[in-house]
Amino acid sequence: MTTRAASTFDPAGQRSGLGWLDIVRLGLVQAALGAIVVLTNSTLNRVMIVELGLAAVIPGLLVGLHYGVQITRPLWGHRSDIGGSRTTWILAGLAVLALAGTLAAASTLLFADRPALGLVVAFTAYLLIGMGIGASGTSLLALLATRAAPEHRATAATVTWMLMIFGIIVTSIITGIALDPYSHRQLVLVTAATGLVAFVVAWLAVSGLEKKPAIMPLRDRSGPVENFRDSLRQVWRDREARLFTVFIFLSMLAFSTQDLILEPFAGLLFGMTPGQSTKLSGVQHAGIFAGMAVVGLGGFAFGRRLPNLPKLFIIIGCLGSAVSLALLSLAATLAPSWPLAPNVFLLGFMNGMFAVAAIGTMMALASREGTGNAGMRMGVWGAAQAISFGLGGLTGSIALDLGRLLTSADSSAFALVFALEASLFLVSTVVAVGIGGQTAMAAAPDPSYPLAQPAE
């Protein structure tokens, strides 16, 4: 959808855009994405290892594949910039994701009798899953960035991400009930039904939202850059964009490195049972929720008066994450005499704070100055995040194995890995300090700019 600059201001004197109900609707789209992805990343992972008896490396590589494919996010973002409608790409990506999730579930029917064919089908499915996530997720964030008022972006990021987690929780509960008693055929039916419901919810939620006016200043009326290379080059020439790409890569690498080692840490050094370590993971996610909520409430209350607030939350979150991980490194040497649950809650809280503030900053940078390539910018940062998440779990596992080999002690190995993560967060903090001069100005509401209204 193209835009033309309006010649008048909003009669109420306020810049219009997405209202809070509209932001919640986009959050439902994000929830739909999460609902499908949780089945492919968690349920199918368990089925392949436990019910099918496959080597753990197979689902690990498949999940890594869907992260790797998301390096194509800049392409999908660029297509949504020039394609006339981000809604089309959101729904097209979700449709591909729903179908691919069902195909991945169907591969379980083949592994028992024709494992080679099952692997080919699963490989194809996870390839398409990565493409679907890239196309839909990137276009969704670009739509949110260009339609939400600058002072609402931090809270909008909180709302959408909390709804995504809510969607994951609800899907996990409902599908868990529907899959009992388990069969491969039942898994396919449940996955297909989840994909269909998620698509319908997203379609209803996103319908008509793109007709809302984009938040863009009059002085920048340039349309999207038609050529992919030119658009990518324009993003990479922007110092803020380059710096933020480095920040996303480092911080998300630090964020994801502990994913596969926290529960083993609790089991090996604190003697926790699988049930207890799973509860510990719940404590961490409760902390993430709380950290996100603080950013959302802070943005809602002070976003208009304190345009630098997202940057402050990022710095506090990264520093707090580094401190939390340093404490876990200390805990490895003092285990089991350490208050592990409060430490893990603090880690989750700081992670949630910096992560959702980073999303808000991402939206501000993507739409600042009306560059017309918000999708490309979101794609570049989404690709950096996907690569980090793909490398994070692998990095943590390798670092742990090397630590155990070098020190011959689990406690020393875990201490080294947590110290490494803390160092990554400290470096991320240094990078984050350099971000935000222009971002802050872009985030501040300026009533001297007329709105860009949708073309008729």
Image (cartoon, rainbow, N blue to C red):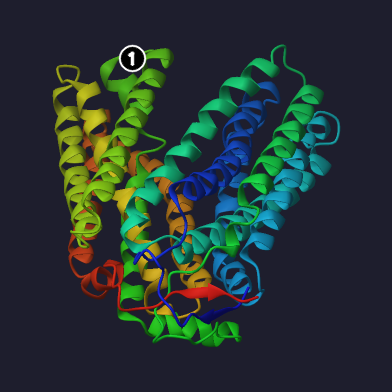
- Is residue 145 positioned above or below 224 on the image? above
Left or right side of 300 for 177: right
Within-10-Å neighbours for mark 1: few <14, some 14–19, many 20+: some
Q: x and y percent of residue 390 in the render?
A: 48, 51
Whether 369 is drawn above or below 165: the answer is below
Picture quadrant of residue 435: bottom left
Quadrant location of the C terminus in the rendered image: bottom right
Seen in the image, is 183 located left or right of residue 137?
right
Q: Residue at x 26, y 67 (%)?
A: 444
Residue 329: % across, % down: 18, 36
User: What is the secondary structure assignment of the residue under circle 1?
Assistant: loop
Measuring from the top left, give residue 411's x and y in whole percent: 23, 29
What's the residue at 58%, 57% (across, down)? 209
Residue matched to label 1: 272
Which residue is rendered at x = 40% and y = 63% of the image? 363
Whether residue 204 can be seen here: yes
Dot 1 amino acid type: Met
* 193 or 17: nearer the viewer: 17
Q: Evaluate whether residue 55 shows in this view.
A: no
Q: Is residue 370 left or right of residue 185?
A: left
Q: Is residue 292 above or below residue 450?
A: above
Residue 308 in picture, x, y percent from top left? 20, 62
Instruction: Tell me the quadrant of the picture where the N terminus can be found.
Output: bottom right
